[in-house]
Amino acid sequence: MSALPSVSIVVPAYNAVRYIGEAVTSLLMQDHPDFEIIVVDDGSMDGTADIAGAFGDRVILHRQVNAGQSAALRVGWSMARGELIGYLSADDRLRPEATRRCAEVLAARPECVLVYPDFDLIDESSHRTGTVRAPEFSRWALYANLHCMPGPGSLFRRSAYEAAGPWNPQFRQIPDLDFFLRVALHGDFIRLPEVLADFRRHDESTTYRYAPFDRGEEPLRMVSVFLGRQDLSEDILRWESAMRSNAHLLSAAIHGQSGRTALALKRILKAAMLSPSSMVSKKTLSYLKTITKAARTTSVP
């Protein structure tokens, strides 16, 4: 069997002293034979860099003035030497076989540019609370439904990254979705139906904390920028109404969980006008539950 492609994982970290040790330890346990770890400390004001630095030359540590997650990843990936690259949030973890298994899949499927596994959910104390079985890849689900399928443990080809470009620093709420929309223009993704990572849910994670108004508008801006590209295929362009509808639904969810109930409902109505069929989905019901729950507990203008 030929050698597996080399892998580089970047860990962007900002004030991650509570979890960074677990994240890096999980990477040091990887059984991939050609693997490197790059931690980019993005101006942390706690002991994050000290913990990462304590692992010695097993970890490449880069320290910079705070510039945000997108900038940290751009720097980390520019330092990476791997043929396959990825990232791990400083509060998540990988299973020991994660990078090897993902590298094996991409080595066997040269037509695919990204692989993503299933993952467990863990709480603040690292206790397992559930398992996420990721959906099989579908271009319709990614583009029309704006379903961000890749989660922790995903790897993608360096060539696809270089073609797509890095994360856009203008997007702070959903930069990963914007990135994956661009990467998929260069090839399909593939799901690896094995639990290979742990995704931590806690109050300080971007996914669950209060988001200011500008971040609630981000899905609308992101889709408008993407649809303004000149290299989109006809199949993507014919999903424009569905994309814009789902961008409004995602905007509604972000505004809703942040207490802006009236604006969230306005976004839902607009979504229904753009694409009535988009309203009949489990995702829409989930967003409505999020908005209803937030409306009971908080009110933010």
Image (cartoon, rainbow, N blue to C red):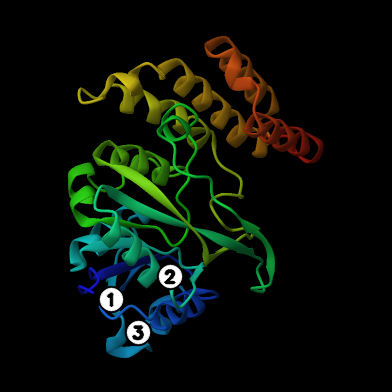
First in sequence: mark 2 or mark 1?
1
The residue indicated by pointer 3 is 53
Q: Amino acid at mark 1?
A: Glu
Residue 270 disc label: none
Count residues near mark 1 (Cα–Cα under 10 Å), then give few for <14, some for 14-19, many for 20+. Answer: many
The residue indicated by pointer 2 is 98
Q: Is residue 141 above or below residue 273?
A: below
Q: Amino acid at mark 2?
A: Ala
Foreground residue, 206 or 7? 7
Residue 36 disc label: 1
Q: Is residue 151 above or below residue 141?
A: below
Q: Quadrant of residue 36?
A: bottom left
> In x, y percent, where is residue 117?
47, 58
Confirm whether residue 42 shows in the render. Answer: no
Residue located 43% across and 78% down the image: 24
Give the left or right position of residue 251, taking residue 230 as reference. Answer: right
Q: Quadrant of the C terminus?
A: top right
> In x, y percent, where is residue 228?
28, 21
Q: Are marks 3 and 2 in contact (CB under 8 Å)?
A: no
